[in-house]
Image: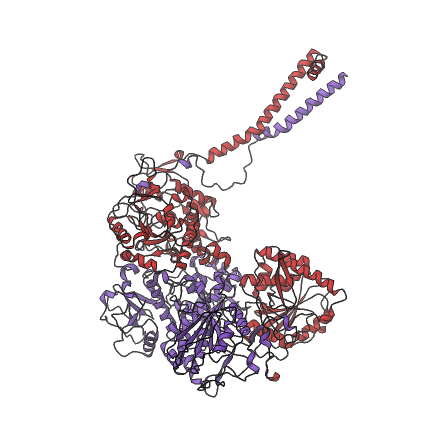
Chain colours: A red, B purple
């Protein structure tokens, strides 16, 4: 109250004291400014939405407003599909040209509404699924809006279901597309081909050379390597959420859930039920459902009502019989339920059969063997059934689940044909994520013992210990299988000694200078390395005998995909600290070898330099430590195999060499090494190292046998 | 006072103006000036306003309620597996093959192929019991052609095998017969029904065959990137500059002398460019495989051999000839990992399926057997990774984890337990001490005693911690490698009653075996050598610096090798082993080496110093002395294999601290070192 009084007193006091002329002037000015401010404020908030609503109007039109194209009755019709088409005869690959990303470019024609001379539409303009499909393509990396750069053209004329279109007029509509050119490089998607009474297994619309991604191909209409067989999309995939059910025995062994089966087939499946009783369930559509219940989602057996597709999860095997069409949407439902489809449709080309291995997820039974289905299925071992159940669900998740998945898989298949050297492998298509994660594909999988004659290249990493380096060079050069010696000069401030000062050895000696003093230089894939076998050796490893090194090389020949080294080390799980620990004590196990002297395949140099995961390489260079642990991790991770420790050699430095403060130095060293293991394990996301209890010795090592008859007598010092 | 007020008012005013200009100016500017064209984002497929209202492509009730008579596909004279092959005849014992005897005199090759099929497990002598009738049409030169056979029946369940293309004019209608021929054209090939064979040269070895040429995993430095096939035969390596030459014969007008290599020579390059037009090029395809030169096939018009089961994308690049320049650029930039994988796969495929006529024929039969087996056929992994489907029998299992070869790919591990299989031969003494030693191992799951002599079975056995089963064998040495159903673990420790082992030896050997489940891990060894004097192979059990065989009297190996021994070896070899018992060791080692292509593994054996040769035949308690190594045996086996699969090793796997000067308390396998 007080304040308002004060205000009332002071408020008027300000203005009345001015001259009236000024007062009006000021008030006007104020109101103008105020108005301006308000207007500006509004402008700040409004204009954007006005603008974007303009964009919005441009993009988000209604399907009903698309331009209408009138097709004269006598406009040209493409020729019928050519059954002899192959990629190299009917596909113009030049349009795909060079593409650094090895991705085809796909253009989508603008949506039009086609009408005949009388204004009667040729078909539904576009279905929900086809719109989804084109959206998926448009959102993908394949899409281009530049028609001149496109390699593949997708008409927006919807031919997913042949029954919703007029064949001749649709063909005419195709023929007048701007880049039609006999259908070359055009891709049509069709899921429901054919029509009564004879139901062709491929789209009846004449389409000349166009590729057809069709659901329900038979061996007679499918052009192997040209067409793509796709699934018939089931709308239930999106409507119903069936949580994954673990594999294992289920209530029914065999289930038939299809409605509208031909009576002949229905008799056959019902005969199965009569013969095998409870374990077979044959469902049909319900006749006595109350109003308002969706009949699509119910199935009945006698008077028992089942929910569909949930009931599919109760069965181990589900019958997928041919209907009028070969391709059935029920296949998708069955896979979604993790039920193994029993496909009984002779000559049916299963979806994506070009890349998917259906033997792993389904059982195909010839129609005439239908009565034997039960015994055929029973002969499958339980483990294989579980594998198939898992595989079925995975196929659904990856390739059936959505229109988008179907569209992208189709484009990927065509892409792989055009850029075969960048194609996706069988494993990537078929292995479920769990298998992909657990499996290791050894890059050196061929069992092969390289010839001894090839020899090895020794790589000595050195900084400035020239004297010791020269001793190492002299020692290593005595090894019979040495074929080349490479010195990596890691000191940028000092030049390597002159040529004349180097020891004279019987094999070529090369010095490479590095740009930076980094530990990872030792694992660089130098051009100078000509042999497969590489011996990485430090410039102070003078204690290894020629016998030890030669034997190490022999062992590497028998295990060319492994790290073969001398002193072994172990990683242990520290239960107190809950982390990994580095161990160099006398143990009965090894999981790493030191690379102060180790043989390995030169391919691992390439992997170390270019494919090391995460920031491990930088970490190693920054800490100037643990490059050997990193190499051990890398090799074990990529090959899935353990290292080979050779000979009893325990450490490289002589025990008395450690200085007075050796102990504490040793301890910080151990802590650092443990830290490396933990760091690397977290980068790899797993602990790849493998623990073994063996080492390799010469056959007659420490045997009671004349020493002079042994091949490698000079082995055994620690 | 007034000026103060005026000033403040002016200040407020100008501040407001400033605000107005700042805020509004830009907007006005934007209105006044037309916006500059922004870099155009690709205009995608429009988001339709009424997208949610669109109809689905198929209405639930739309599908015909009751389909008319289910349409049968028009056969059009063409055949597919379902319509033209009657699998009901193959029920029971799988694929049984009857081979039509040749009408007239036959060539040596023909005779050998017949013999090889007759030796295989598929063969039957009765055409009535056969599910596949094989019509050989082999000889290219003699022009020998078969006439219509007796049991022809419109060709149903017949396979016409033509090793060399167009060797015979078609004297009769093939009807429903399958055709296995070399490099069929893509258009005539009936996928899933016919079988595509490789194009074999005339002089292709019948058995064994030359091993792949690959000596190292990665391409040698300095080796040419590309080899081109010459029209006259042979290969021409192309430098990086000539790789841009438009290939197709146009550049080959002047190959220049010296550039052309001899016809027999295999290409020495990383990639081999092969035309897809001429079927003869298909023979080049095989050469490239053998040489480990990655075939780059340009728009092949012929079907690749065994394309039904072999995933050629893992070993070759099948590209479009019209994009040659892009292909060449892609080859140059291909990652080392990819080159490495492709190269190794060429070698594996060559060795597994193509290196001999016998392998080609067996692969053909295996492909057809897989079709008959349906769900129990070889999974793709078994066909496409070493050792290949001929050596990984699908009758053993269809789960890759059950085999010793695929643990890495499957992310699985071999089982942690083993079964000891003790063979009691002529001596007839129950090996009680041995049973105790073996049963003492923590990894031992069961002990099986295979009683294989004339004496009656002892009624009492020692009490053991693990189940003990006695099998009454049929007195044959090859019994030792029979796949007894009672063996329930992956690992088998094969023992002879006369062997003596300690528990810690068994433990250590088993731990080693777990790291090498596909190999044999043994204690005592012998090695083979080429005997110049006799011009044949020999072998010795003497201790040397290397070895190539381990004695199966004490060895760990995978249970699968019993199946392989019994079901895949030719009958003649098993008979040989029965007749000369020392041969059985050699035979088993040959078998495992042929599969793994690697030497076995030796682990330390402690008793060596006590007895000069404890396991070697002739110990104190043996009855009849076993024969000394029989060179005949190894030569016969080598002849049957067609090559020498044994590999030598120069190492022994010891425990990490074996005989190290460190307290024995630290050592896990300390009793191994007891003098």
Residue A661: in sight, yes or no? Answer: yes
- Give how far across and how far down residue B246 sits, in percent: 45, 61
Q: Choose between B554 and A674: the one closer to the eye.
A: B554
Decide if residue A647 is on the left or right side of residue A10. Answer: left
Q: Is residue A335 above or below residue B194?
A: above
Quarter of the picture containing the N terminus of chain A is top right
User: In the current view of this chain or complex, which residue is farthest to the bottom?
Assistant: B533
Q: Quadrant of residue B189?
A: bottom left
- Give how far across and how far down residue A682 sits, in percent: 60, 55
Residue B311: in sight, yes or no? Answer: no
Q: Choose between A612 and A286: the one closer to the eye.
A: A286
- Give how far across and how far down residue B407 sits, in percent: 48, 64
Decide if residue A129 is on the left or right side of residue B523. Answer: left
Q: How many marks?
A: 0
- Give how far across and how far down residue B375 sits, in percent: 36, 60
Quarter of the picture containing the C terminus of chain A is bottom right
Q: Quadrant of residue A598?
A: bottom right
Q: Choose between A396 and B439: the one closer to the eye.
A: B439
Image point (26%, 48%), residue name: A262
């Amino acid at each position: 109250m007080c304040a308002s009084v004060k205000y009332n007193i002071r408020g008027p006091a300000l203005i009345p004291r001015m001259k009236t002329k000024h007062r009006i002037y000021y008030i006007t000015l104020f109101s103008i400014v105020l108005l301006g401010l308000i207007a500006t404020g509004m402008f700040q908030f409004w204009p954007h939405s006005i603008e974007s609503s303009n964009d919005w109007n441009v993009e988000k039109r209604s399907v009903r407003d698309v331009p209408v194209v009138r097709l004269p009755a006598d406009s040209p019709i493409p020729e019928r599909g050519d059954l002899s088409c192959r990629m190299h005869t009917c596909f113009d690959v030049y349009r795909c040209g060079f593409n650094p990303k090895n991705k085809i470019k796909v253009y989508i024609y603008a949506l039009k509404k086609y009408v005949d001379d009388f204004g009667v539409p040729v078909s539904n303009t576009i279905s929900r699924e086809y719109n989804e499909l084109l959206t998926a393509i448009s959102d993908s990396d394949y899409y281009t809006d530049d028609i001149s750069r496109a390699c593949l053209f997708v008409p927006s004329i919807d031919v997913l279901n042949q029954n919703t279109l007029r064949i001749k007029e649709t063909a005419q509509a195709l023929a007048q597309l701007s880049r039609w050119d006999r259908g070359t490089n055009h891709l049509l998607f069709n899921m429901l081909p054919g029509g009564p009474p004879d139901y062709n297994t491929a789209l009846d619309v004449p389409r000349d050379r166009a590729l057809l991604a069709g659901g329900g191909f038979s061996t007679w209409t499918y052009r192997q390597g040209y067409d793509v067989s796709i699934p018939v999309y089931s709308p239930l995939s999106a409507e119903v959420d069936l949580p994954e059910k673990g594999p294992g025995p289920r209530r029914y062994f065999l289930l038939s859930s299809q409605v509208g089966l031909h009576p002949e087939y229905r008799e056959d499946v019902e005969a199965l039920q009569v013969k095998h009783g409870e374990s077979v369930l044959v469902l049909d559509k319900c006749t006595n459902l109350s109003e308002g219940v969706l009949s699509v989602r119910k199935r009945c057996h006698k008077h028992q009502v089942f929910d569909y597709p949930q009931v599919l999860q109760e069965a181990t095997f589900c019958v997928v019989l041919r209907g009028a069409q070969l391709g059935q949407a029920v296949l998708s439902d069955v896979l979604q339920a993790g039920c193994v489809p029993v496909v009984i449709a002779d000559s049916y080309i299963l979806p994506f059969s070009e890349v998917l291995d259906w033997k792993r997820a389904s059982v195909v039974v010839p129609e005439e063997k239908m009565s034997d289905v039960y015994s055929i299925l029973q002969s499958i071992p339980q483990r294989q059934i579980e594998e198939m159940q898992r595989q079925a669900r995975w196929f659904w998740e990856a390739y059936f689940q959505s229109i988008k998945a179907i569209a992208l898989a189709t484009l990927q298949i065509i892409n792989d044909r055009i850029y075969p050297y960048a194609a996706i492998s069988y494993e990537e298509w078929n292995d479920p994520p769990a298998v992909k994660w657990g499996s290791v594909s050894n890059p050196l999988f061929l069992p092969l013992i390289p010839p001894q004659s090839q020899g090895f290249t020794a790589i000595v990493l050195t900084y400035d210990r020239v004297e010791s380096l020269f001793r190492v060079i002299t020692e290593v050069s005595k090894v019979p299988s040495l074929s080349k010696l490479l010195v990596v000069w890691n000191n940028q401030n000092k030049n390597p000694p002159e040529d004349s000062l180097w020891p004279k050895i019987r094999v070529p000696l090369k010095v490479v200078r590095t740009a930076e003093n980094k530990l990872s230089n030792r694992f660089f894939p130098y051009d100078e390395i000509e042999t497969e076998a590489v011996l990485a050796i430090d410039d102070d490893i003078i204690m290894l005998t020629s016998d030890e090194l030669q034997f190490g090389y022999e062992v590497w020949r028998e295990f060319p995909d492994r790290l073969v080294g001398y002193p072994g080390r172990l990683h242990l799980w520290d239960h107190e600290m809950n982390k990994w620990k580095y161990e160099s004590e006398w143990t009965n196990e090894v999981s790493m070898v030191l690379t102060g002297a180790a043989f390995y395949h030169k391919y691992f140099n390439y992997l170390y330099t270019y494919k090391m995961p995460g920031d491990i390489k930088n970490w190693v260079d920054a800490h100037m430590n643990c490059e050997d642990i990193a190499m051990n991790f890398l090799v074990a991770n990529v090959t899935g195999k353990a290292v080979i420790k050779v000979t009893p050699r325990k450490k490289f430095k002589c025990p008395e060499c450690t200085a007075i403060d050796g102990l504490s130095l040793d301890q910080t060293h151990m802590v650092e090494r443990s830290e490396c293991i933990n760091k690397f394990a977290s980068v790899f996301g797993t602990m790849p190292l493998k623990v073994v209890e063996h080492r390799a010795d010469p056959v007659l090592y420490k045997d009671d046998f004349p020493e002079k008859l042994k091949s490698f007598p000079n082995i055994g010092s620690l | 006072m007034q000026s103060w007020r005026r000033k403040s008012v002016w200040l407020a005013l100008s501040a407001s103006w400033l605000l107005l200009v700042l805020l509004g100016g830009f907007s006005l500017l934007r209105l006044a000036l037309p916006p500059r064209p922004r870099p155009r984002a690709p205009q995608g497929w429009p988001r339709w306003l009424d997208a949610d209202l669109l109809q689905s492509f198929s209405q639930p009730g739309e599908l015909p309620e009751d389909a008319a008579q289910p349409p049968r596909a028009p056969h059009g004279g063409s055949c597919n597996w379902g319509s033209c092959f009657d699998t009901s005849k193959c029920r029971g014992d799988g694929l049984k093959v009857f081979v039509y005897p040749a009408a007239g005199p036959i060539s040596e090759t023909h005779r050998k192929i017949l013999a090889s099929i007759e030796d295989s497990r598929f063969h039957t002598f009765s055409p009535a019991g056969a599910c596949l009738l094989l019509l050989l049409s082999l000889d290219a030169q003699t022009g020998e052609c078969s006439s219509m056979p007796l049991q022809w029946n419109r060709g149903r369940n017949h396979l016409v095998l033509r090793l060399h293309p167009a060797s015979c004019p078609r004297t009769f209608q093939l009807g429903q017969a399958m055709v296995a021929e070399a490099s069929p054209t893509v258009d005539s090939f009936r996928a899933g029904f016919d079988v595509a064979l490789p194009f074999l040269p005339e002089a292709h070895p019948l058995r064994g065959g030359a091993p792949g040429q690959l000596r190292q995993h990665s391409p040698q430095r300095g080796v040419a990137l590309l080899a081109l096939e010459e029209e006259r035969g042979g290969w021409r390596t192309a430098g990086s500059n000539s790789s841009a030459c438009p290939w197709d014969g146009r550049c080959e007008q002047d190959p220049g002398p010296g550039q052309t290599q001899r016809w027999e020579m295999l290409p020495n390059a990383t990639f081999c460019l092969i035309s897809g037009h001429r079927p003869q090029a298909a023979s080049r395809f095989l050469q490239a495989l053998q040489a480990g030169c990655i075939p780059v096939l340009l728009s092949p018009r012929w079907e690749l051999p065994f394309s039904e089961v072999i995933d050629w994308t893992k070993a070759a690049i099948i590209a479009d000839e019209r994009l040659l320049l892009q292909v060449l650029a892609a080859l140059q930039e291909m990652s080392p990992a990819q080159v490495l994988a492709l190269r190794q796969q060429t070698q594996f495929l060559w060795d597994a399926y193509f290196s001999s006529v016998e392998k080609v024929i067996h692969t053909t039969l295996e492909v057809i057997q897989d079709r008959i087996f349906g769900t129990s056929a070889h999974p793709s992994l078994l066909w496409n990774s070493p050792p290949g489907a001929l050596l990984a029998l699908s009758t053993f299992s269809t789960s890759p984890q059950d085999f010793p070869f695929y643990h890495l790919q499957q992310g699985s591990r071999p089982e942690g337990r083993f079964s000891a299989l003790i063979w009691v031969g002529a001596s007839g003494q129950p090996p009680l001490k041995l049973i105790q030693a073996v049963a003492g191992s923590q990894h031992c799951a069961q002990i099986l005693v295979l009683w294989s002599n004339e004496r009656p079975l002892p009624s009492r056995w020692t009490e053991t911690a693990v189940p003990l089963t006695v099998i009454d064998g049929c007195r044959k040495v090859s019994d030792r490698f029979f796949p007894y159903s009672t063996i329930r673990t992956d690992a088998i420790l094969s023992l002879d009653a006369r062997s003596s082992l300690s528990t810690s030896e068994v433990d250590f050997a088993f731990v080693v075996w777990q790291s090498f489940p596909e190999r044999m891990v043994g204690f005592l060894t012998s090695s083979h050598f080429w005997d110049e004097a006799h011009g044949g192979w020999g072998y010795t059990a003497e201790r040397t610096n290397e070895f190539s065989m381990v004695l199966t009297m004490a060895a760990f190996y995978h249970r699968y090798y019993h199946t392989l021994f019994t079901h895949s070896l030719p009958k003649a070899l098993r008979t040989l082993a029965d007749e000369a018992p020392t041969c059985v060791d050699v035979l088993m080692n040959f078998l495992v080496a042929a599969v793994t292509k690697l030497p076995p593994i030796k682990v330390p054996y402690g008793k060596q110093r006590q007895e000069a040769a404890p396991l070697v035949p002739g110990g104190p308690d043996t009855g009849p002395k076993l024969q000394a190594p029989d060179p005949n045996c190894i030569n016969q086996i080598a002849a049957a294999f067609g090559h020498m699969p044994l590999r030598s090793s120069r190492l022994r796997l010891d425990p990490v601290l074996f005989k190290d000067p460190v307290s024995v308390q630290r050592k896990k396998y300390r009793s191994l070192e007891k003098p």
